Amino acid sequence: MQYNEKLQTIISQVAEIAGYLWERGWAERNGGNISYNITEAVDDPIRRLPALSDRIVLPKTMTHLKENYFLVTGTGRRMRYVCSAPMENASIIRISADGTYYEIVAEKPIQPTSELPSHLTIHDYLLGQGRPNKAVIHTHPIELVAMTHNPDFLGKDVLSRLLWSMIPETRAFCPKGVGIVPYTLPGSLELAENTIRQLDEYDVVLWEKHGALAIGEDLIEPFDMIDTLSKSAKIYESACSMGFHPTGMTEAQMDELKQAFNL
Ligand code: 13P
Ligand code: ZN
């Protein structure tokens, strides 16, 4: 199918980021998923597309997503193949005029990710608040997930402070830190609801013993935040494996950064 330039740019970005997730080792088998609100890029030829699927009822009414369109990676699809053939491994869905169901409209009837409840609940919530975020990434970054296995790190902002203190970039480019969602069944509405509560304060959330989820105006921004936090986690791991506990930057050094960069 021929897509307009705006849509083509979004599809290329999904492919680019999916490739990074695979290269980073965060996307074993079908691990991870991506969604992108493409409504602004949708033109008449797409609006006229007939449904390729039955009406699929949503777990709750998405009040703010009525007649919105999303590019969503397919369930069971591998990120490495989303990279090489995006429209063979993702589909475009249209939310109904009453926000209660969706239909797949392009390009093939590829069933969306099992984490669709979280993705759509997040888009619905953010749009309702007038926030500009269009992209959601969920992935399985090794060191960050490992850190969620330590109960000592799960208290509010404990992990944020530790990760900030590993390298100035993390303090500068992830100024909000990371939220934590206690272990919740993957794909559940409960996971979605627990996640949106964290998004009031954070742009990156760690799902305990599972993965990371990040939001952004495009996909580059949330990928970079997970990547930067992951760098800090690797530095921490590296120091521990050298046999010492890293001292980390001091509170005063982090405050100095906060002022210098207006964070
Ligand atoms: P999907 O293949 O359904 O996207 O699931 C992958 C995943 O990471 C679930 O949390
Ligand atoms: Zn997952």
Image (cartoon, grey):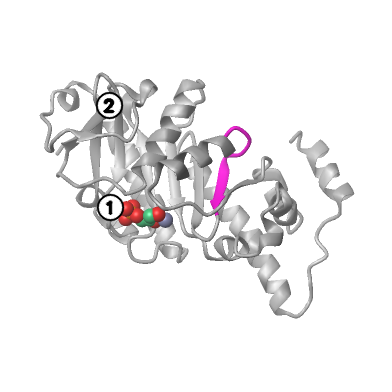
- In depth, the one of 246 and 148 nearer the eye is 148
Q: Does the magenta stretch include residue 205?
A: yes
Q: Is residue 121 above or below residue 21?
A: above
Q: Which residue is drawn at 72% across and 74% down?
A: 240
Q: In which quadrant is the N terminus drawn?
A: top left
Range shown magenta: 199-207
Q: Name the residue under label 1.
A: 75
Q: Earlier in the sequence, mark 2 or mark 1?
A: 1
Q: In this view, does 52 lie to the left or right of 150?
A: left
Q: Where is residue 69 in the image (x, y as percent from the top left)?
A: 29, 29
Q: In which quarter of the image is ligand 2?
A: bottom left
Q: Is residue 156 left or right of residue 127?
A: right
Q: Is residue 245 magenta?
A: no
Q: Where is residue 148 in the image (x, y as percent from the top left)?
A: 60, 60
Q: Position of residue 138 (x, y in %)?
A: 44, 50
Q: In this view, does 38 lie above or below 204?
A: above
Tag of residue 100: 2
Q: In which quadrant is the C terminus drawn?
A: top right
Q: Which residue is drawn at 27% across and 45% down?
A: 112
The picture quadrant where one finds residue 62 is top left
Q: Does the residue labelled 1 lie within 8 Å of ligand 1?
A: yes
The reply to whether residue 13 is in sight is no
